[in-house]
Image (cartoon, grey):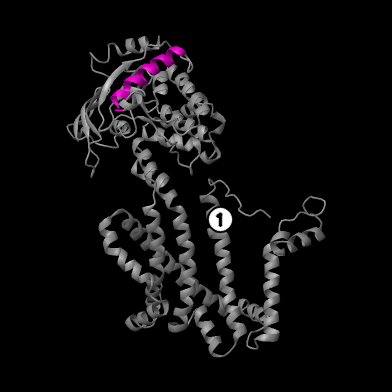
């Protein structure tokens, strides 16, 4: 099972040993905001794990990714990736933070640069040897089914293709960890389903550590080794749930639907929708 | 209007015209040619029957040929063009620095914004007259007057574009750890390009408009001075002909300068849909 192999790769259970991606008691308040976005948030993700962070809108799950990627500095707590401490008690510690892949909700490609130039810029930023650029771009575009679009302007591609380019960009720099912020939420359901399956097909042989933020419970259960459920804002992690469904998984698998149902019921209570579950008597 | 509906009409057999007669016919159906013909015809009619002072196209044509075959014209053209280009470059440099600074720093914005706003409304002739009073007649006066009038407009273009930058692309460039140089080159400048192009075009045209006035009032050489000279000697055909000469220069700059640059810079843009299909 993929889950088992990833654990063997990391050498230990992520909770008992130092995890690959580690967030400890992190708190964050946006400048000028009255309520904190994150309070006392902790989570640990093992190397090679596919982790989903699940939470309602505005719970601070995207903020978590901003912190991991260096866009925001947490006020309190400690953050480390692969043993390198990024932030400690409100201070940026790492001089050269590790290169990370990041897939945003929207593709965020530079429309005035070709697909290849977009990927090259990310490779340059990650300080990948220039001699390997062409090979990496071709390989990862090929894996995303876009090899023949390398020298095309992004504006010529469909929304789904653009998001695939964004995924190829995140993977091509071969980072220790890839962050994804609801990357399929703006696509239509059929394309989104296809892309989720594709993402798993891409990820399984590479085994990069993926931190995937979503508000869709079905998506989280389908993709993840572990789902971290966050509270409604201000955010903190309520629970870490293992999804013990063997891979490859099918989106329509009844077992998956069962786990989803359980999680939905639990989550509704946690997120404060008591009336919705209480039935007609109240 | 017939001009528009007839545009781009293929020849009757559906293929492109290749015979000499076909070429003549296809030139004849070009909207630009048609509008030119109509304009000249209307001009002719007006000068023949309504406005005695208005020279006919033929008189202007003769004066035009006279002008462009004289050595004097090219001396004046070089002087005027040099003034326009220098003022334009100066205005662009100031506008880019000030416009970006205003868009990025609230302090500079707070200090500069009222001044830019007020100077937008300064009448051109007033600036010219005060420049002459303050600095006397000479190249410096021309330069200062042009800069004071043209720069605020270009600043406004740049300033607005700087405020409308896409922060999402900024985040992307930070996450992917692009160098400062790459961020300027690949993220910042391409976003500024449309405003810079618009500002450059506008600034160039504006410099020309004003240089005529400055030369007429304060200079003894240049196309504006010639126009003023012919005006004083009541020779409207030459006034129009000399104005046309510089218009031709402007068209050349537009087609071989700005439009060529446009094609290069904005090749990535998907073709905009035509709202009205003919």
Image quadrant in which you'd find residue A146: top right
Q: Which residues are magenta?
A: A254-272
The chain holding disc 1 is: B
**What's the residue at 68%, 63% (across, down)?**
B31
Quarter of the image where one finds residue A242: top left
Q: Circle 1 — which element?
A: helix
Q: Quadrant of residue B138?
A: bottom left
| Residue B204, placed above or below residue A10 | below
Side (left or right) of B165 relative to B256: left
Task: Give the answer, above or below, for where B245 lies relative to B255.
Answer: below
Above or below: residue B38 compared with residue B8 = below
- Residue linked to disc 1: B260
Q: Measured from the top left, where is residue B4 in percent x and y?
A: 69, 61
Residue placed most toward the observer, B256 or A262: A262
**Please, which residue is most extreme toward the bottom here?**
B233
* Left or right, residue A39 beside residue A202: left
Left or right of residue B54, residue B181 in this image: left
Q: Would you say residue A248 is visible in this rendering?
A: no
Residue B95 shows up from this direction: yes
Q: Point out the image quarter for the C terminus of chain A.
A: top left
| Residue occupying the point 46% across, 67% down | B85
Q: Position of residue B141 (x, y in %)?
A: 38, 77
Prevalent SS, magenta region: helix
Tell me which residue sits at (41%, 73%) in the image.
B146
- Does residue B203 show up magenta in the picture? no
Q: Is residue A143 above or below residue B219?
A: above
């Amino acid at each position: 099972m993929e889950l088992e192999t990833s654990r063997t790769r990391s050498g230990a259970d992520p909770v008992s040993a130092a995890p690959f991606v580690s967030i400890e008691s992190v708190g964050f308040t946006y400048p000028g905001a009255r309520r904190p976005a994150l309070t006392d948030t902790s989570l640990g993700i093992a190397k090679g794990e596919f982790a989903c962070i699940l939470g309602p809108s505005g719970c601070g799950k995207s903020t978590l990714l901003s912190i991991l990627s260096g866009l925001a500095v947490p006020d309190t707590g400690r953050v480390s990736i692969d043993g390198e401490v990024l932030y400690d008690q409100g201070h940026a510690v790492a001089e050269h933070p590790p290169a990370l892949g990041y897939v945003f909700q929207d593709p965020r490609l530079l429309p005035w640069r070709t697909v290849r130039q977009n990927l090259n810029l990310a490779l340059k930023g990650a300080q990948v040897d220039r001699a390997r650029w062409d090979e990496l771009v071709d390989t990862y575009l090929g894996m995303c089914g876009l090899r023949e679009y390398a020298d095309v302007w992004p504006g010529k591609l469909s929304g789904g293709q653009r998001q695939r380019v964004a995924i190829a960009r995140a993977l091509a720099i071969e980072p220790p960890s890839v962050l994804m912020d609801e990357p399929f939420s703006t696509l239509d359901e059929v394309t989104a389903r296809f892309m989720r399956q594709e993402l798993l097909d891409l990820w399984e042989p590479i085994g990069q550590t993926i931190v995937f933020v979503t508000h869709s419970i079905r998506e989280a259960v389908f993709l993840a080794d572990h789902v971290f459920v966050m509270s409604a804002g201000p955010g903190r992690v309520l629970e870490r749930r293992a999804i013990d469904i063997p891979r490859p998984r099918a989106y329509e698998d009844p077992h998956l639907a069962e786990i989803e149902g359980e999680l939905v019921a639990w989550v509704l209570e946690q997120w404060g929708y008591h009336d919705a579950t209480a039935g007609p008597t109240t | 209007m017939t001009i528009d509906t007839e545009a781009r009409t293929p020849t009757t057999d559906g293929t492109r015209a290749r015979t000499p007669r076909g070429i003549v016919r296809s030139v004849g159906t070009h909207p630009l040619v048609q509008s030119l013909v109509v304009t000249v015809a209307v001009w002719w009619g007006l000068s023949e029957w309504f406005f005695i002072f208005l020279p006919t196209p033929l008189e202007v044509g003769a004066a035009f040929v006279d002008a462009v075959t004289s050595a004097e014209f090219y001396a004046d053209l070089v002087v005027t063009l040099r003034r326009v280009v220098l003022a334009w470059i100066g205005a662009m440099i100031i506008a880019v620095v000030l416009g970006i600074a205003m868009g990025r720093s609230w302090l500079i914005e707070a200090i500069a914004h009222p001044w830019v706003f007020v100077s937008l409304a300064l009448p051109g002739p007033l600036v010219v007259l005060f420049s002459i009073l303050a600095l006397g007649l000479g190249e410096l006066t021309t330069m200062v007057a042009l800069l004071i009038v043209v720069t605020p407009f270009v600043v406004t273009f740049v300033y607005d574009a700087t405020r409308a930058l896409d922060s999402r692309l900024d985040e992307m460039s930070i996450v992917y750890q692009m160098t400062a140089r790459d961020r300027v080159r690949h993220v910042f400048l391409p976003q500024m390009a449309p405003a810079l192009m618009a500002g450059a075009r506008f600034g160039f045209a504006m410099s020309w408009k004003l240089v005529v006035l400055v030369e007429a009032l304060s200079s003894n050489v240049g196309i504006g001075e010639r126009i003023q000279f012919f005006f004083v000697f009541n020779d409207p055909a030459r006034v129009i002909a000399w104005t046309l000469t510089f218009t031709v220069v402007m068209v050349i700059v537009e087609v071989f300068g700005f439009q060529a640059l446009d094609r290069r810079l904005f090749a990535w843009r998907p073709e905009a849909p035509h709202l009205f299909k003919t």
